[in-house]
């Protein structure tokens, strides 16, 4: 096993009907990372699509994984990926949408609860721990009285899509910085900007 190996999981729902949804922003970030690494996603026996590579020569190796399951049952594939790559949850970075963070904001943290996010809830249940790193991509709160469940399953608005590439790039930068320099260094950059 590579001593500098990280598993990076992007949460979302499978299929083209969900591809542009706010709930799929984690998988959008992984697409950005795969483009940077010139890596292609391939079907993996852990019920995931996986791409492997390095962001820069000599840098940490990243295993990018998109579970083929719906978000609410992401835990099984994530636990299987950790076993397959012989990694501890401390080497896991989960990229996901977060309603409690304003749109166009990235926050980083280690551990904590699931905050009502069913994908995180299932990963915590399947791995038996909440001690993994989260890259929380802010999607903001739904307008008016729109239910959160409806809001996350809608595509980004045209106004949001104008700045979405910058948000995805920031989240991808955060993943690379965590893997290369550690969580604290990444937090200093993203939480004090």
Image (cartoon, rainbow, N blue to C red):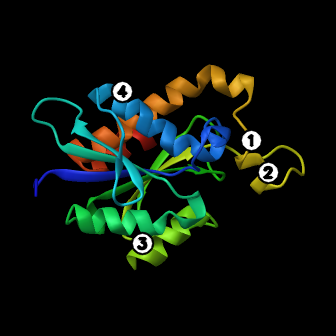
Task: Find out whether the residues at labels 2 and 1 contact each other: C-beta distance under 8 Å.
Answer: yes
The CA distance from mark 4 to mark 3 is 29 Å
> What is the number of the mark on residue 130?
3
Residue under label 2: 150
> Which secondary structure, mark 3?
loop
- Quarter of the picture containing the N terminus is bottom left
Image quarter of residue 130: bottom left
Going from N to C along the chain, the mark reached first, 4 or 2, is: 4
Residue corresponding to mark 4 = 35
Q: Nearer the viewer, mark 1 or mark 3?
A: 1
Select label 4 or label 3 by which is in front: 4
Badge 1 density bin: few <14, some 14–19, many ≥20, Cα 10 Å? some
Residue under label 1, please give it: 154
Q: Secondary structure at mark 1?
A: loop
| Tag of residue 39 | none
Left or right of 142 in this view: 93: left
């Amino acid at each position: 096993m590579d001593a500098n190996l990280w598993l990076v999981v992007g949460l979302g729902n499978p299929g083209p009907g969900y591809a542009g949804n706010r709930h799929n922003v984690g998988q959008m970030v992984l697409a950005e990372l795969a483009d940077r690494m010139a890596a292609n996603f391939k079907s993996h026996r852990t019920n995931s699509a996986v791409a492997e590579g390095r962001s820069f020569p000599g840098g940490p190796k990243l295993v990018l994984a998109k579970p083929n399951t719906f978000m609410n049952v992401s835990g099984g594939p994530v636990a299987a990926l950790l076993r397959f790559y012989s990694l501890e949850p401390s080497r896991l970075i989960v990229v996901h949408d977060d309603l409690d963070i304003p749109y166009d904001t990235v926050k980083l943290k280690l551990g904590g609860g699931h905050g009502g996010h069913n994908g995180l809830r299932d990963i915590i249940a399947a791995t038996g721990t909440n001690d993994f790193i989260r890259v929380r991509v802010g999607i903001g709160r739904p307008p008016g009285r729109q239910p959160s469940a409806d809001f996350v399953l809608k595509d980004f608005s045209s106004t949001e899509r104008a700045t979405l590439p910058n948000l995805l790039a920031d989240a991808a930068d955060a993943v690379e910085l965590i893997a290369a320099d550690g969580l604290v260094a990444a937090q200093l950059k993203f939480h004090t900007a």
